[in-house]
Amino acid sequence: MKFQDKVAIVTGGASGMGYEMVRLFTEEGGKAVIADLNEKLGQEVEDAFRAEGKEVTFIKTDIGSEESIKSMIDATVEKYGKLNVLCNNAGVGIGRNVVDERPEDIQLMFNVNIKGVLFCCKYAIPYMLKNGAEGGAIVNTASNLSLVASHDIATYTATKGAVASITRQIAYDYGAFNIRVNAICPGDTRTTLFKNWLATKENPKEIEDALLARYPMKRFSEPVEQAKAAMFLASDDASFITGQVLAVDGGMTIW
């Protein structure tokens, strides 16, 4: 099994792509911490996975809080004795053009999407260094909007562009310690969040059709497709891959 006896943290692990990352990691013999702000859902997911015989633990975590992040990572290592994989998957997206952006939304997205990734790496890497030659793997969730522009989503694209840059920089700094850092850049993915966002629009079908027109594969991603890409980058199958920002977007960024 690819992750036998390895320990992972997945932020935003209670739903969507994060849920699928936890599922795939544990199916390959690993132990996973679900770091999520949604306490009710997180506990339900832990209970469901444990009923299947999988080793998972839910830890309520506010990825916008340095203190909460540090506490969660320390608790992970206290429980499992080590940390091998970090999936920085949690994120916040609020779509507005730069003129209409609200200061509180800008601050929220910077706190979660940028500072959250930085603080997770800050407190996870010292534990990965203790693994010696085994090192560790970090997989960040950026966005295909870190590579191309879209409509009225200024701050979100800025924060995801920062995630791509953070990925390359930390990979450079810690490559000699066999700590690999990569990012996936999902295209539109049929998560509950995405479906709910579409439902708020006056003409959801028109918006969906306009989005699909940008995809050569003429469909949106499923959460498990993103999780499979992340788990590849987290595994030893990607042992000589680091600092890469991988578009998993059905070809949307080709043109």
Image (cartoon, rainbow, N blue to C red):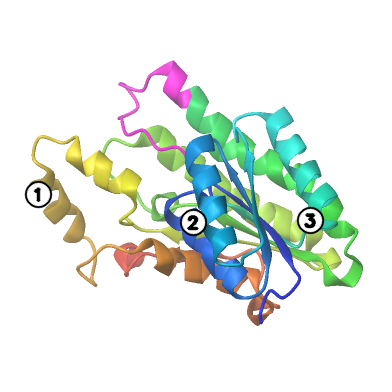
Query: Does residue 211 show up magenta in the picture?
Result: no
Q: Which numbered circle lies on residue 125?
A: none
Type of the residue with mark 1: Lys
Mark toward the start of the polypeptide (1 vs 2): 2
Residue 65 percent location from the top left of the image = 65, 28
Residue drawn at x 76%, y 37% is: 70
SS under mark 1? helix
Task: Report if residue 103 lies within the magenta region.
Answer: yes
Q: Depth check: 62 or 121 in front?
A: 62
94 left or right of 6 in image: left
Looking at the rendered structure, which numbered label has been put on residue 19?
Answer: 2
Which image quadrant for residue 87?
bottom right
| Disc nearer the start of the sequence (2/3) | 2
Question: Is 132 in front, or is 253?
Answer: 132
Quadrant in which the C terminus is drawn: bottom left
* Residue marked by disc 1: 205
Q: Which residues are magenta?
A: 89-106
Where is residue 133 shown, x and y percent of the image? 88, 71
Main secondary structure of the magenta stretch: loop
Q: Which mark is residue 173?
A: 3
For the residue carrying disc 3, how many other residues have a C-alpha within 10 Å: few (<14), some (14-19), or many (20+)? few
Kind of residue sitting beneath label 2: Tyr
Name the secondary structure under disc 2: helix
- Gap between marks 2 and 3, in whole Å? 29 Å
Residue 29: where, in percent of width, then height? 66, 74
